[in-house]
Amino acid sequence: MLWVLVVERTPFPDSKTEVLVAENDSNKATGSDKRKQSLYFPESMLQEIKDEAARLDRSLSWVVQRAWKMARLEIKKIPSVNDIDDGEDDVGG
């Protein structure tokens, strides 16, 4: 499955840059629906991604995909909000 990143600047100063992720039209033959997802990056982070993409002579999409592949095992180690013990069970007892 191929995804396309479209970077759009918001009209408000100091706002984050919106990155739209749209599923490629190639899935129409399979009957799947087309979906869009917005990802928001701070301007400074997006600029770093752009700088690295230029340095590597790769697309923004490639850099983000590679970063995800490299980081996903570390991200999976982060506990979900449902896994965090807030200590409420220990009170009064």
Image (cartoon, grey):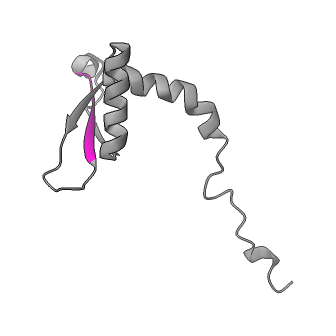
30 w.r.t. 42: above or below: above
* Residue 1 can be seen in this image: no
- Tell me what residue is drawn at x 31 percent, y 28 percent: 50
- Tell me what residue is drawn at x 75 percent, y 72 percent: 87
Give the image quarter of residue 19.
Answer: top left
Q: Please provide the residue range marked out in magenta.
A: 17-24
Q: In which quarter of the image is the C terminus?
A: bottom right
Give the image quarter of residue 88.
Answer: bottom right
**Residue 21, image x, y percentages:** 29, 34
Q: Which of 62 and 50 is in front in this view?
A: 50
**Residue 92, image x, y percentages:** 82, 86
Left/right placement of residue 75 relative to residue 85 reads left
**Residue 12, image x, y percentages:** 16, 56
* Residue 7 can be seen in this image: yes
Give the image quarter of residue 37.
Answer: top left
Queried whether the magenta region covers residue 18, the answer comes back as yes
- Tell me what residue is drawn at x 79 percent, y 82 percent: 91
Helix, strand or loop: magenta stretch: strand
53 w.r.t. 71: above or below: above
Point out the residue furthest to the bottom here.
Answer: 92
Q: In which quarter of the image is the N terminus?
A: top left
Q: Which of 25 and 8 is in front in this view?
A: 8
Left/right placement of residue 64 relative to residue 18 reads right
